[in-house]
Amino acid sequence: MTTTKTPQATTTPQKAHVPDTRRLATDADPSTAAEVQPGDATLYERLGGCYGIAGAVDILVDRLFQNVKVNANDMVHKHHGNPANAAGYKWLVTSWSIEAAGGPKCYIGHDMDTAHEHLAIDKAGFDAVSKEIEATLDFVGVPERELREFMDIIESYRSKVVQA
């Protein structure tokens, strides 16, 4: 019986894919890229459609789950403290954001009152989330006009989210 020597692997594993976040929001979805947008494009279109919004939310939720001020609320931390919740939360925040920005109807979660009524979110908690949203939009390169427009939407929900 003869044996053959198996060659040792000489290649190194490839690095995990890291998305290029430069100008993510405006160039991610070719169908909504700036050069093809009409002058009356919706905020959804100007944010890059579902690809731009999903890319920003992917980063945002990771940041929210790590944010000390956001997680100071025990009820919020109960959800954010479990990494298994991240994927579903990303999907809900993405679909909510798509609708809030004027995109297609796809959000199946609770209305903002119901979704937050048991969390006892105070002004400081809302402000911490708002700052994280703004910082994330800035990080992915959302232009100032669209960033302000989306932040105005977030602010319009303050009275529905702040319960304490």
Image: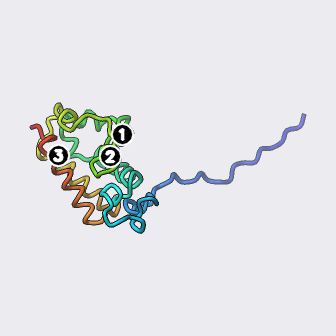
User: Which marked residue is nearer to the observer: mark 1 or mark 3?
Assistant: 3
User: Which marked residue is nearer to the observer: mark 2 or mark 3?
Assistant: 3
Circle 1/circle 3 CB separation < 8 Å: no
Residue located 30% across and 57% down the image: 43
The outermost residue toward the right is 1
Is the residue 20 above or below the residue 161 in the image?
A: below
Q: Secondary structure at mark 1?
A: helix
Q: CA gap, disc 1 to disc 2?
A: 7 Å
Q: Mark 3: which amino acid?
A: Tyr
Q: Position of residue 141 (x, y in %)?
A: 34, 64
Q: Mark 2 highlights which residue?
A: 61
Q: Mark 3 highlights which residue?
A: 157
Is the residue 84 above or below the residue 149 in the image?
A: above
N-terminal of the pair, mark 1 or mark 3, is: 1
Residue located 33% across and 48% down the image: 98
Relative to the observer, which residue lies in front, 95 or 18? 95
Q: Mark 1 highlights which residue?
A: 86
Q: Mark 2: which amino acid?
A: Val
Residue located 36% across and 39% down the image: 86
Q: How many marks?
A: 3
The outermost residue toward the top is 118
Circle 1/circle 2 CB separation < 8 Å: yes
N-terminal of the pair, mark 1 or mark 2, is: 2
Q: Mark 1: which amino acid?
A: Ala
The outermost residue toward the left is 164
Q: Position of residue 131 (x, y in %)?
A: 21, 54
Q: Position of residue 59 (x, y in %)?
A: 35, 51
